[in-house]
Image (cartoon, rainbow, N blue to C red):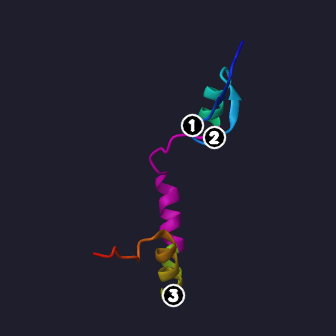
Amino acid sequence: MAQPVRCDICGKLYSSSHVGAHKRLSHPRATSADPALVQKILTLFDSLSAEGKKKVLMALGVGQRKAN
């Protein structure tokens, strides 16, 4: 009989016989980025104002410096 187990990614309970399929379908591994998607993101970023670019970079944590 299948035992309940927790998904080590999201923490939800699943049957031990189904957790593998859940992880494969719900939490796919990061793959190499689609070049067309990357180009679209860069095009959108380039179309932003200077202030908009600054906000995006701050939201991504790129514009922050570590305290020494």
Residue at 52% x, 73% y is: 59
Residue 40 lies in the magenta-colored region: yes
Q: CA distance from mark 3 to mark 2?
A: 39 Å
Residue at 35% x, 76% y is: 65
Q: Quadrant of the N terminus?
A: top right
Using a 10 Å C-alpha cutoff, classify the residue at mark 3 as few (fewer than 14 neighbours), some (14 to 19) or many (20 or more). few
Q: Which residue is mark 3?
A: 51
Name the N-terminal-most of marks 3 and 2.
2
Determine whether the residue tagged by mark 1 lies in a helix, strand or loop.
loop
Question: Which disc, if any, is residue 19?
Answer: none
State which region is magenta: 26-44
The three-letter amino acid code for the residue at tag 3 is Glu
Picture quadrant of residue 63: bottom left
Picture quadrant of residue 13: top right
Question: Which disc, if any, is residue 8?
Answer: 1
Using a 10 Å C-alpha cutoff, classify the residue at mark 1 as few (fewer than 14 neighbours), some (14 to 19) or many (20 or more). few
Tell me: residue 20, above or below residue 37.
above
Q: Nearer the viewer, residue 33 or 56?
A: 56
Determine whether the residue tagged by mark 3 lies in a helix, strand or loop.
helix
**What percent of the width, then of the height, locates residue 47?**
53, 79
Residue at 32% x, 76% y is: 67
Contact check, label 3 and label 2, Cβ < 8 Å: no
Q: Which residue is mark 2?
A: 11
Q: CA distance from mark 1 to mark 2?
A: 6 Å
Tell me: residue 7, above or below residue 3.
below
**What percent of the width, then of the height, locates residue 8?**
57, 37
Residue 36 lies in the magenta-colored region: yes
The three-letter amino acid code for the residue at tag 2 is Gly
Contact check, label 1 and label 3, Cβ < 8 Å: no
Determine whether the residue tagged by mark 2 lies in a helix, strand or loop.
loop
Q: CA distance from mark 1 to mark 3?
A: 39 Å
